[in-house]
Image: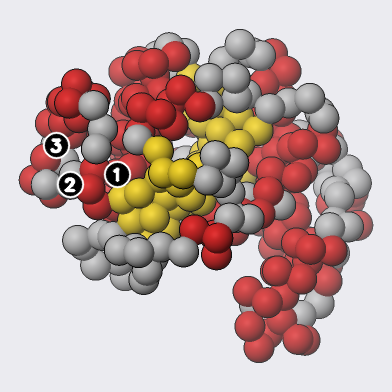
């Protein structure tokens, strides 16, 4: 069980966020350190990331309890370490200006959602984190490649990106984009199921475009703010097994200190076999949600 003062602190956070009605307790999820091979309290997790430059939180986009965990963790990190940059897969790089204008209180939330092309579950899943960043004066990175360019890669291949104007290419990572990760490629094909057997490489390269974009935006910010922790949220496929975005970022600077969380509901929550999950992340957070997943 977490220390009582830590539980009280997080309970206050829940009240501030209007989430107390969910009656979520720490007993509804478990944190496991694959390096230490033991479960951790939230406080122990905070202590363990003291030297980390970038902490990836790999989520399942429709996991309501997972969203609560990441929001609470972000608030705890801010409390423990001060300035912390939030980085989001959920906003595309060409929406950074819109996001910055909202954080500066220059535009309304309605404009942020519309002009920033916020995800349909934004208010329920990601709004709490953005609002925390706004009230605490924290930077937020719109990290993902614009979907139109990812679709372009899927249709015409990576070479098509070089045909874009310089104005367009500013929203993308430097070319060429690294794609030669055989383990990630195999995992991607398996995830695609039946379609994976006949999948064109362009589809995988589109995935790599997402990964490289997020990695580059994080790297670019870290290079200017090396004393700040960056807390990046993405679908866990992008960073599980330290592949995808994780590997792309590590390739940009070998000495950048990265750790990843993989968070998801598990059927074996009551008696998890941690060895099954050991390769997926530095930390595994297994959850049991009281809510149905979003449609």
Label 3: few (<14), some or many (≥20) within 10 Å?
Answer: few
The residue furthest front is: 37
Check disc 1 and report the residue beneath it: 68
Q: Find numbered disc 1 in the image and state the secondary structure of the residue it sits on.
A: helix
Q: Earlier in the sequence, mark 2 or mark 3?
A: 3
Q: Nearer the viewer, residue 25 or 53?
A: 25
Q: Earlier in the sequence, mark 2 or mark 1?
A: 2
Label 2: few (<14), some or many (≥20) within 10 Å?
Answer: some
User: Horizontally, is 24 left or right of 242 in the view?
Assistant: left
- In percent of the image, x 68 and y 27: which residue is there? 257
**Could you tell me if the residues under marks 1 and 3 are in contact, i.e. CB atoms within 8 Å?**
no
**Could you tell me if the residues under marks 2 and 1 are in contact, i.e. CB atoms within 8 Å?**
yes
Label 1: few (<14), some or many (≥20) within 10 Å?
Answer: many
Check disc 3 and report the residue beneath it: 18
- In percent of the image, x 75 and y 61: which residue is there? 184
Determine whether 72 is above or below 126 in the image.
above
Query: Gap between marks 2 and 1, in whole Å?
Result: 9 Å
Check disc 2 and report the residue beneath it: 24
Give the x, y percent position of residue 215: 70, 38
Q: Is residue 97 visible in this depiction of the protein?
A: no
Q: Nearer the viewer, residue 257 or 40?
A: 40
- Quadrant of the drawing holding the C terminus: bottom left
> In front: mark 2 or mark 1?
2
Give the x, y percent position of residue 14: 18, 34
Within the image, what quadrant is residue 121 found in? bottom left
């Amino acid at each position: 069980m977490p220390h009582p003062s830590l539980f009280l602190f997080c309970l206050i956070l829940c009240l501030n966020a209007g989430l107390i009605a969910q009656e979520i307790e720490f007993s509804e999820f478990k944190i496991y350190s694959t390096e230490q091979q033991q479960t951790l309290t939230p406080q122990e997790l905070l202590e363990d990331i003291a030297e980390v430059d970038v902490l990836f939180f790999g989520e399942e986009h429709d996991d309501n309890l997972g969203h609560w965990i990441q929001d609470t963790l972000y608030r705890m990190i801010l409390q423990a370490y001060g300035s912390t940059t939030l980085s989001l897969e959920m906003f595309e790089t060409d929406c950074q200006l819109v996001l910055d204008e909202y954080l500066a209180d220059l535009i309304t939330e309605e404009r942020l959602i519309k002009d920033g092309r916020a995800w349909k579950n934004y208010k329920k899943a990601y709004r709490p984190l953005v609002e925390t960043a706004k009230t605490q004066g924290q930077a937020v990175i719109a990290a993902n490649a614009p979907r139109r360019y990812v679709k372009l890669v899927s249709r015409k291949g990576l070479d098509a990106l070089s045909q874009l104007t310089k104005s367009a290419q500013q929203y993308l990572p430097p070319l060429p984009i690294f794609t030669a990760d055989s383990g990630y490629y195999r995992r991607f094909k398996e995830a695609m199921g039946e379609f994976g057997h006949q999948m064109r490489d362009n589809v995988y390269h589109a995935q790599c475009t997402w990964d490289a974009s997020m990695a580059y935006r994080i790297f670019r910010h870290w290079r200017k703010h090396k004393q700040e922790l960056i807390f990046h949220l993405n679908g866990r496929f992008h960073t599980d097994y330290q592949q995808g975005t994780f590997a792309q970022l590590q390739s940009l600077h070998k000495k950048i200190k990265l750790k990843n969380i993989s968070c998801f509901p598990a059927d074996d929550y009551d008696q998890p076999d941690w060895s099954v999950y050991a390769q997926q992340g530095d930390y595994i957070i297994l959850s049991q949600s009281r809510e149905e997943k979003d449609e």
